[in-house]
Structures are given as C-alpha cells and as structure tokens.
C-alpha cells in the first residue's frame, strides 16, 4: 500500500492546499493530510479548528482515501509512525523550494527510505497563501475566491470573535 503524508501549517487551508491534496490523493492509496503544530509558530486557529477546516475540503472533494489529523513534533517521526513512504510538499516559489529542500535533506539523513515529493501549485492558485486570506478577511474583504465558503465562514466568525 502506497501511503503519503501531506503535512501543512495552513492557517487557514486554501484552495491551493486543497489542489495539492486532491492531486496527491489520485497518486496514493492513502494520504494523511496533517496539521503540523509547530511550537515556534503562532496560529490564528486552534488545532481542532484547523482539522475541522481541512475536513471541509476532504468532504467537499469526496476524498475517501484521505485522513485528516494533527501532529506535534518531528515530521519524519510522524511519517514513520504512519508507515508512509512519501512526504508531499507544495511549492509556490523559490523560497518554498529552499526551505523544503533543506527539510528533505535533513529527513533523508534520518530515514533514507522516505522520499519527499514536491508538487508545483497551479498557476491560478500560486499567489494564494493563508497569510493573504487572513489579511483580506481582517480588512473585511471577501475570501471565498481563495477558500471554501464553509471555511470562509469559520475564518470570518473567528475574526469577529477576536475583534469583540
């Protein structure tokens, strides 16, 4: 069985993240779409809310071979625990490549059997980032071109809650 892990710090997940997920799900028997919880990062959304938003995409695209969960700690150890052979990363820019390349080299030093596959984002989704979505939402702009409507609702409700 070919298993992949697609770890993400998506905060919130966007159509760009979903594109990588959908394409990955077509290539592997099972995919763990995993919300990475990095202690060095500040997340607008709690772990369970990020998982909820990710599940919205899984349901929307009817991805039967995808499991969404959160994890803390080492990505490579998480991948080993899931008995996956591949880590999937989405690339939008040269900066993405540099960071992912360094991680891939480090991971290879820990477990030479686990490969890192990189997928380029689609051109029409290249500029979409979680940061852009949050900034637009904070300014009261529509974000439904960048995220599912159900995810947009979660983001907007969180912003309203934050502002009161």
Image (tube, rainbow, N blue to C red):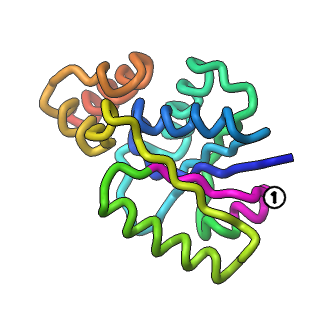
Q: Give coordinates of residue 64: x percent, y percent.
A: 74, 26
Q: Which residues are magenta?
A: 78-90
Give the farthest residue toward the left: 139
Q: Quadrant of residue 135?
A: top left
Q: Is residue 70 above or below residue 40?
A: above
As drawn, the residue found furthest toward the bottom would be 109
Neighbour tally class for label 1: few under 14, some 14-19, many 20 plus, Cα within 10 Å: some
**Residue 83, x across and y down, in percent:** 81, 58
Was residue 60 drawn as part of the magenta stretch in this picture? no
Residue pushed farthest right? 1
Relative horizontal placement of residue 113, taking residue 157 as reference (left or right): right
Q: Residue at x 48, y 63 (%)?
A: 38
Q: Which residue is mark 1?
A: 83
Q: Quadrant of residue 52?
A: top right
Q: Secondary structure at mark 1?
A: loop
Residue sitting at x 67%, y 33%: 26
Asked whether 81 falls inside the magenta stretch, the response is yes
**Rendered residue at 26%/40% (across/down):** 127
């Amino acid at each position: 069985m070919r298993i992949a892990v697609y770890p993400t710090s998506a905060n919130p997940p966007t159509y760009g993240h979903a594109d990588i997920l959908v394409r990955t799900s077509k290539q592997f028997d099972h995919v763990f779409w995993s919300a990475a919880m990095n202690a060095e990062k500040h997340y607008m959304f709690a772990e369970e809310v990020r998982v909820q938003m990710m599940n919205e995409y899984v349901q929307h695209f009817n991805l039967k071979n995808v499991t969404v969960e959160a994890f803390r700690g080492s990505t490579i150890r998480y991948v080993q625990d899931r008995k996956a052979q591949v880590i999937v990363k989405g690339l939008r820019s040269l900066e993405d490549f540099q960071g992912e390349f360094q991680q891939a080299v480090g991971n290879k030093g820990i477990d030479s059997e686990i490969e890192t596959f990189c997928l380029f984002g689609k051109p029409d989704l290249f500029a979409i980032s979680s940061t852009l979505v949050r900034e637009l939402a904070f300014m009261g702009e529509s974000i439904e071109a960048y995220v599912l409507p159900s995810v947009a609702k979660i983001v907007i409700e969180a912003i309203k809650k934050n502002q009161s």
